Image (spheres, rainbow, N blue to C red):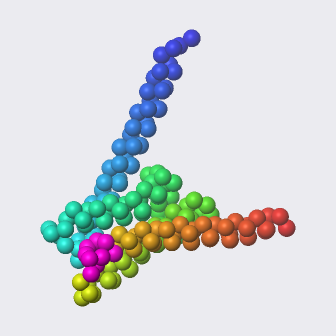
Amino acid sequence: MNIHGGTSQRNAGILSKIRIILKNGSLLFCSSIFFHVIAVLFGAPFLESSAETFHFGMTMSATVVVPALCVMGTNTVQWIRIFAQNSPELGVESIVYFSTICSIVGAWLGAFPIPLDWDRPWQEWPITCVVGTLFGYCTGVIIGAVHLYINYNRIKRIKIT
């Protein structure tokens, strides 16, 4: 009976989990920087509010990248199929797809009140974009759940008859 065989397998499992965590963590950090750069390219303050812009990038990463990483991991074939080819499978993938799209659209729509000359405190960067992102994410989850419910019942009826 080999006692050390089980230990090495357990260590290999732990090391693979650590690699996955480090890979996903680095992807999350890189996506935060990516969204920060995109926000600056769309007109966010570069030097004055860099911390706020990075926090907005982290919010975007939390609503766009984290759900996708939880469902698909780092499988690029699935990412391309879902986001580039717009063909998520019915289930959690469709909810992630809708929440991702709605988060991005919500952030974009949230930027509209910023240049208005109302001078309200809630118009400061990036408050409206963060609210738009979170509202878009919640809307996407609801749309995804309704889409899942409608299509699941339709598929269920087809299989029964």
Q: Residue furthest top?
A: 1
Quadrant of the image occupied by residue 114: bottom left
In percent of the image, x 24 and y 83: which residue is there?
A: 119
Name the quadrant of the C terminus.
bottom right
In percent of the image, x 70 and y 65: which residue is there?
A: 152
Q: Between residue 126 and residue 40, name the one nearer to us.
A: 126
Q: Which stretch did the figure color magenta?
A: 120-128
Tell me residue 102's x, y (percent): 46, 72
Q: Count the marks.
A: 0
Name the quadrant of the N terminus.
top right
Quadrant of the image occupied by residue 113: bottom left
Residue 52 visible, this orientation: yes
The relative height of residue 108 versus residue 159 in the rendered view (above or below) is: below
The relative height of residue 76 versus residue 2 in the rendered view (above or below) is: below
Q: Residue furthest front?
A: 121
Quadrant of the image occupied by residue 20: top left
Residue 87 visible, this orientation: no
Tell me residue 72's x, y (percent): 50, 54
Q: Residue furthest right?
A: 161
Tell me residue 14's x, y (percent): 44, 32
In percent of the image, x 50 and y 19: which residue is there?
A: 5
Q: Between residue 53 and residue 37, name the one nearer to us.
A: 53
Horizontally, residue 107 falls left or right of residue 10, namely: left
Horizontally, residue 95 falls left or right of residue 116, namely: right
Q: Residue furthest left?
A: 47
In percent of the image, x 33 and y 75: which residue is there?
A: 128
Tell me residue 123's x, y (percent): 28, 78
Q: Is residue 114 magenta?
A: no
Horizontally, residue 160 falls left or right of residue 62, namely: right
